[in-house]
Image (cartoon, rainbow, N blue to C red):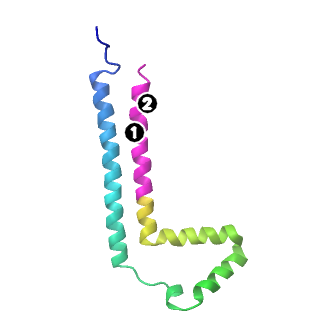
Amino acid sequence: MGQWPRLTVHQQRRVIRLRRIGASLLAACIGLAMIVYRVGLAHRTPTAAELLPGTAAVIERQRGILFGRSGAAMFDLFETLQEPEGQAGVLVLVGIIAAAACYQVAHKIEVGED
């Protein structure tokens, strides 16, 4: 005799559905990130630090004096997230987390039925 299936038909469908949802979420977030990046590049305006020569170095030095290395690094991260590539990166990261959550739930359904 053959082995009986570990999961019921309903559970198998739920696992398959969760995995498809996870893959769809990842693909949708990547597509949305591409759109956000393209639109952000098309509508990007130069900052004051880019327009005035030498301003970026002065601002960086003042931040380092006021907030230390960690504070300056956080400001750099915040400025990066304001750029189109930073926003697109956050969207891709959210898609990866959402897909991983869906796959984890599907895995828990499979493993929990031993």
Total tally of numbered discs in the picture: 2
- Sequence-earlier tag: 2 or 1: 1
Q: Position of residue 55 (x, y in %)?
A: 59, 88
Task: Please determine whether, in this image, residue 97 is positioned above or below residue 38.
Answer: above
- Seen at 39% across and 45% down, the residue is 99
* Residue 13 falls left or right of residue 75: left
Question: What span is colored magenta in the figure?
Answer: 92-114
Q: Alpha-carbon neighbours of circle 1 within 10 Å: few (<14), some, or many (≥20)?
A: many
Task: Please determine whether, in this image, residue 111 is positioned above or below residue 78.
Answer: above
Residue 73, quarter of picture = bottom right
Q: Is residue 108 magenta?
A: yes
Q: Which residue, given by chain and number where applicable, does mark 1 sit on?
A: 103
- Seen at 51% across and 70% down, the residue is 80
Q: Which residue, given by chain and number where applicable, does mark 2 sit on?
A: 108
Question: Residue placed farthest to the front in the image?
Answer: 1
Residue 56 bears which disc, if any? none
- Seen at 29% across and 36% down, the residue is 17
Residue 58, quarter of picture = bottom right
Q: Amino acid at mark 2?
A: Lys
For label 2, the SS is helix
Q: Which quarter of the rendering shows the N terminus? A: top left
- Seen at 72% across and 78% down, the residue is 65
For label 1, the SS is helix
Q: Alpha-carbon neighbours of circle 2 within 10 Å: few (<14), some, or many (≥20)?
A: few
Q: Position of residue 9 (x, y in %)?
A: 27, 23
Prevailing SS of the magenta stretch? helix
Residue 88, quarter of picture = bottom left
Q: Is residue 18 magenta?
A: no
Q: Amino acid at mark 1?
A: Tyr
Q: Which quarter of the rendering shows the C terminus? A: top left
Task: Give the spatial CA distance, label 2 vs label 1.
Answer: 9 Å
